[in-house]
């Protein structure tokens, strides 16, 4: 199959947009060239180019097409519109059944012709998140000025341009010329295919493959660090960004002035990362080292000495600024900053960060006894948790909120537990973060997340679709992880009620009604996040839903660890033959009751044992009574193995009942009593899990 190669060469593309741009090119070309059935493309992206190589068919064969048009007798306007849309004449239509049908032969087309026809449209409608115009009067836009287009099919140029009417499309015409490194190998050169393109770029100091470029950067930094007995602080995000900034990686090592080594390590690291894209280092003991690594985009004649000196000079200036903020901030005690939070808006409808600090103090005090924390320490930490938002350091580096509160609290002489709780209350921010583990930190972190959930649910600002502007999904996942990883037995309803009590406004004005509204909506929101997490761990979504549903009315048992343990035990039951047959029996009973309820139901209430006429009825009634008793005895102790054994023992009497008893007996009293017995099967099993939610 012919090989199609496309390169779009431009000025420097922001690193965060390069991979997305390459993937969008692949998607649009797959759509535009669908008749050629392109294979899986190989993508390339970097600071000044995105490119694609893919195998395609050599041509599209001629084919017959049939398009159904308006009905016979439709208005002339409808018929004219259909013909105009397809560029056809009236005589091209034939009547088939009740409709006009347009049948015609579509001629074949070479791959080169199809590509040339499709590519201008692909590039004109390319959906960059942000794009720009440049020079001239053309309305064509790109993420940065587009300079060259290479389009080759088996080494031959596929010719097209970007003109549209009077718009010259910046005079861009496809060709076979590209450029190498801007400084070490300037100027254009011709290529005839993807492999030659890669090899020639390498000769001209450009690594086209982003995976190779990333590996070279990572290996280069690690080698220079190891040569000095150091290790690199892992930072995947920074590594990814630098990969998008560099074409020819050259790893270099600089020195941090000793005068700045008493700054908090996080301050140095964030300043280096955000401002300069430097990598922090650790010594052999794992302590911060007075060195930093960075990646140059050029091979210097002096082995990088001047580049290193320049970067060390820039870093001294950056860290001097950080020193200024650090010293200035420590002149004001953290507790004195709480009042300043009155000028920091949390949300227009939810007040200020000062209001939030008061709520966090109250809520952390309520949670503290439940997690073994000192209530007064938890309240103090909750009050101070947001105070560092008014500091110069956090204003400069928002990534350090919480962290700077920890250092300033230590400086002010606050107890270690309070300082750590201030630092940790945002955790976990992502899947790779650890969770708080000390009691005061747990209390404040949970208070922060439940207040966030309750506040935004109260004003109906919940996530929709892929949008989550207030990070409520992250808050819910944080709650789940903190509870699971610390083995906490907490009632979700109790925590939500405590959070709702501190709110002053809500769509539901009455406090009791507001608590019920938030309890229902937030608990289901957290429950949904937990189901997704459990599904990723191998537990079916429908089994989790069934197990959780039965506990929603029980405040004491509505805690995450209880729900998870019961769902896992329920999953184990349904994997057995008894469990699957029990599910079949349940469905049969429920279906019969549902059908008969429509006739003369509901058939609820206790069945009368004196009215039983068949041994199988007595046996099922007794089995249900024993199962109900065993379930009631085992559930408070969370002896789910016993609960599931009690359920499994129902299988034989249920099977026997359906085999030997006619439910819809001609005797109305007998029929009603048997339907009540079937209703009791449903009700007994639903006390453990809602079997109706099980799929399959």
Image: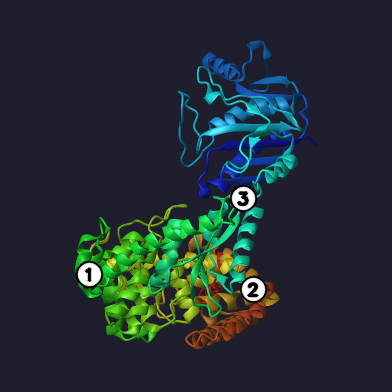
In this picture, residue 386 sits left or right of residue 24? left
Residue 269 at x, y = what percent? 45, 66
- In the rendered view, tell whether residue 104 sits above or below residue 292: above
Instruction: Determine which residue is flagged by label 1.
Output: 337
* Residue situated in front as seen by the camera: 360 or 535: 360
Instruction: Residue under label 2, please give it.
Output: 574
Label 3: which residue?
248
Observer-nearest of 469 and 316:
316
The quadrant of the image that shows the C terminus is bottom right
The local crowd at label 3, few if under 14, some if 14 to 19, many if 20 or more residues have their Cα within 10 Å, is many
Give the image location of residue 637, x and y in percent: 49, 88
Q: Secondary structure at mark 3?
A: loop
Q: Please determine whether, in this image, residue 183 is positioned above or below residue 277.
A: above
- Which secondary structure, mark 2? helix
Mark nearest the camera among 1 and 2 is 1
Q: Position of residue 687 (x, y in %)?
A: 50, 76
């Amino acid at each position: 199959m012919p090989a199609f190669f496309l390169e779009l060469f431009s000025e420097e593309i922001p690193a965060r947009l390069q991979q997305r741009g390459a993937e969008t090119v692949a998607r649009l070309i797959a759509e535009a060239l669908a008749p050629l059935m392109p294979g899986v493309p190989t993508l390339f992206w970097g600071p000044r180019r995105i490119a694609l190589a893919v195998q395609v068919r050599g041509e599209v064969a001629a084919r017959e097409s049939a398009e159904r048009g308006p009905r016979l007798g439709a208005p002339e306007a409808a018929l004219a519109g259909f013909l105009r849309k397809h560029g056809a004449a009236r005589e091209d239509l034939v009547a088939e059944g009740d409709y006009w049908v347009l049948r015609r032969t579509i001629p074949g087309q070479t791959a080169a012709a199809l590509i040339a026809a499709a590519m201008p449209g692909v590039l004109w409608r390319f959906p960059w998140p942000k794009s720009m115009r440049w020079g001239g009067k053309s309305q064509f836009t790109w993420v940065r000025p587009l300079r060259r287009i290479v389009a080759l099919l088996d080494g031959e140029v596929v010719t097209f341009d970007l003109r549209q009417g009077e718009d010259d499309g910046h005079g861009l015409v496809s060709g076979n010329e590209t450029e190498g490194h801007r400084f070490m190998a300037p100027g254009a050169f011709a290529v005839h295919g993807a492999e030659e393109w890669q090899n020639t770029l390498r000769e001209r100091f450009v690594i086209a493959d982003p995976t190779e470029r990333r590996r070279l950067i990572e290996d280069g930094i690690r080698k220079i660090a190891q040569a000095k007995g150091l290790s690199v602080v892992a930072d995947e995000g920074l590594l990814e960004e630098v990969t998008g900034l560099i074409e020819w990686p050259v790893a270099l090592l600089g020195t941090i002035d000793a005068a700045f080594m008493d700054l908090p390590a996080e301050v140095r690291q964030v300043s280096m990362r955000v401002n300069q894209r430097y990598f922090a280092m650790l010594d052999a003991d794992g302590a911060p080292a007075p060195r930093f690594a960075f990646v140059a985009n050029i091979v210097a004649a002096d082995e990088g000495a001047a580049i290193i000196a320049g970067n060390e000079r820039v870093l001294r200036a950056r860290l001097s600024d950080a020193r200024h903020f650090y010293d200035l901030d420590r002149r004001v005690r953290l507790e004195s900053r709480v009042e300043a939070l009155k000028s920091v808006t949390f949300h227009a409808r939810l007040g200020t960060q000062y209001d939030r600090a008061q709520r966090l103090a109250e809520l952390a005090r309520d949670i503290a006894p439940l997690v073994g924390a000192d209530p007064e320490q938890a309240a103090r930490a909750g009050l101070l948790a947001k105070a560092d938002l008014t500091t110069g350091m956090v204003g400069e580096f928002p990534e350090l909120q919480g962290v700077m509160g920890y250092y300033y609290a230590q400086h002010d002489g606050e107890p270690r537990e309070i300082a750590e709780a201030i630092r940790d209350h945002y955790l976990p921010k992502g899947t790779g973060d650890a969770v708080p583990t000390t009691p005061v930190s747990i209390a404040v972190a949970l208070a922060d997340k439940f207040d966030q959930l309750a506040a935004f649910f109260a004003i109906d600002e919940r996530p929709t679709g892929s949008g989550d502007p207030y990070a409520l999904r992250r808050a819910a996942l944080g709650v789940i992880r903190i509870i699971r990883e610390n083995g906490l037995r907490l009632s979700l309803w109790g925590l939500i009620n405590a959070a709702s009590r501190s709110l002053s406004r809500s769509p539901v004005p009455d406090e009791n009604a507001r608590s019920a509204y938030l309890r229902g909506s937030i608990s289901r929101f957290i429950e949904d996040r937990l189901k997704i997490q459990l599904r990723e761990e191998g537990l079916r979504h429908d089994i989790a839903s069934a197990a959780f549903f039965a506990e929603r009315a029980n405040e004491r048992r509505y805690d995450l660890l209880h729900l998870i343990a019961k769902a896992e035990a329920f999953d184990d039951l349904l994997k057995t033959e008894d469990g699957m047959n029990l599910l079949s029996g349940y469905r049969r009973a429920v279906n019969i009751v549902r059908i008969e309820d429509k006739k003369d139901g509901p058939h609820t209430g206790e069945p009368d044992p004196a009215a039983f006429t068949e041994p199988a009825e007595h046996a099922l009634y007794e089995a249900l009574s024993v199962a109900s008793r065993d379930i009631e005895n085992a559930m408070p102790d969370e002896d789910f193995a016993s609960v599931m054994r009690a359920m499994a023992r129902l299988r034989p009497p249920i099977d026997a009942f359906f085999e030997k008893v006619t439910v819809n007996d001609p005797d109305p009293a007998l029929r009603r009593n048997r339907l009540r017995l079937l209703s009791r099967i449903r009700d007994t099993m639903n006390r453990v899990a809602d079997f109706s939610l099980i799929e399959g």
